[in-house]
Amino acid sequence: MSTYRMSSPRRQPLPQKTERPRGFTLMEMMVVIALLAIFSAIALPSFSSLVQANRVQSSANEFMSLLQSARADAVTLRTTLTACAASDGSGWMVVQADSCSASATVRARATLASGVNLSSTVSSLSFAADGSAAAAEMSFSSARTDNQFLLKVEPAGFMSLNPGSSG
């Protein structure tokens, strides 16, 4: 006869939790949102000033490009081109004439970015066929930033753009 041996059933060990819970708790999320709000409140005014300073500089660069193009076209076409303030006050335009009139053909246009002020020593600037022009200064500034640029046009037609004012 065979003997049966009764063995006790083997117990399986309980599974150990080795995984950590995923995600964030509500408290952690609220702390992160509060920190983001504080940092945004600190950074936003400086960013706004940076954007306005960039607008002043880009407007000054755009106007210098407009005047350089007008001078080059005057020499190439062997005719007088005149840069003057647009009638709607939005910026300046270049016309193929000795003066800005309603019947003059507009060849190019440059507009001021919002919030940028332009003060000039002349109301129009004519480039002769040899590239010469009257001396002029244009100052670009904004009430919301200290950033200023001065565009100088020499009688020979040479142009320079420098940070700062005419003072």
Image (spheres, rainbow, N blue to C red):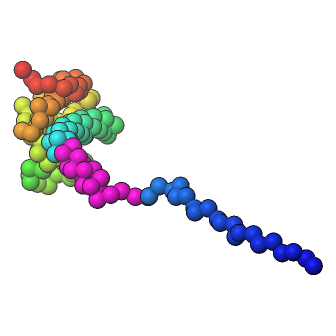
Disc count in the image? 0
Q: Nearer the viewer, residue 162 or 94?
A: 162
Which residue is painted at 11% across and 35% down in the image? 145
User: Which quadrant is the N terminus positioned in?
Assistant: bottom right
Which residue is painted at 11% across and 45% down in the image? 115
**Which of the 4 image quarters holds residue 14?**
bottom right
Q: Residue furthest front?
A: 1
Q: Nearer the viewer, residue 29 or 68?
A: 29
Query: In this rendering, is residue 72 above or below 101?
Result: above
Inspect the magenta stretch and tell me whether residue 30 lies in it: yes
**Which of the 4 image quarters holds residue 30?**
bottom left
Q: Is residue 42 left or right of residue 25?
A: left
Q: Is residue 8 left or right of residue 103?
A: right
Q: Residue furthest bottom?
A: 1
Inspect the magenta stretch and tell me whether residue 93 lies in it: no
Which residue is painted at 15% across and 31% down in the image? 147
- Mark yes or no: residue 101 visible: no
Q: Nearer the viewer, residue 31 or 90?
A: 31
Residue 35: x %, y % from top left: 23, 46
Is the stretch drawn in magenta largely helix, strand or loop?
helix
Q: Which residues are magenta?
A: 22-40
